[in-house]
Amino acid sequence: MAPHMDLPPTKIVRLLQLGDGEGALRASSIWQCVSCQTCSTRCPKSVDCAAVMDALRQIAFERGMASAAERRTVVFQKAFLDNIRRNGRLNEIELIAAFKGEVFFRDRSLPFLFQDAGLAAQLQKRRKLHLRGEKVRDRGVVARIFERAGGGSR
């Protein structure tokens, strides 16, 4: 993704080193990062660039610096992790309901609520949409994973 970013991860880290946190927070790159860890793995100084990008997204979101689309990204990530935390695996219908519901109540956007509805039949036909979600047997394992990752069991 770095070639498509306004500032590659190395320059974001450099801005922070130079004390220009605001410049780093305003970069669209922090929202384009897909957290693939490639920059962190390749960094000759062992800087966890992906974690830096994640932290910058969190700070930008908390300060209200994120656009509507960027806020939706954060809402989706939160809904996804809450879904995994609760079930131990993805429950697509529950995820869709949580994400779309949160965005609808926040933005009051009826078109957004239904914009993907036409995809349901295609996904179901390809067996990519499971109407009945399953839970892992030992959700305590999942809770421990989240605890170790710093996400707690909420």
Image (spheres, helix red, strand yellow):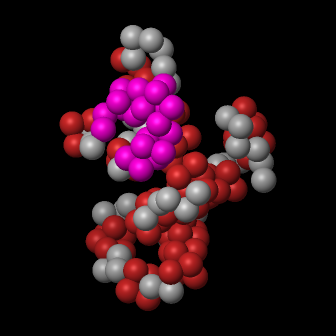
Q: Does the segment drawn in magenta span residue 16?
A: yes
Indicate the position of residue 26 as horizontal and vertical percent values: 42, 50
Direction from residue 6 to residue 130 in the image, left or right = right
Residue at figure coordinates x 52%, y 43% from the top left: 56
Indicate the position of residue 127 as horizontal and vertical percent values: 37, 62
Chief SS of the magenta region: helix
Q: Does the segment drawn in magenta span residue 145?
A: no
Indicate the position of residue 103 as horizontal and vertical percent values: 52, 75
Q: Over which residues does the magenta segment extend?
A: 7-27
Q: Nearer the viewer, residue 18 or 107?
A: 18
Any part of residue 89 in sight: no
Relative to 68, say whether 111 is above or below. below
Relative to 19, say whether 76 is above or below. below
Residue at figure coordinates x 50%, y 86% from the top left: 108
Q: Residue furthest front?
A: 19
Direction from residue 91 to residue 5 in the image, left or right = left
Number of numbered markers: 0
Indicate the position of residue 140 as horizontal and vertical percent values: 78, 42
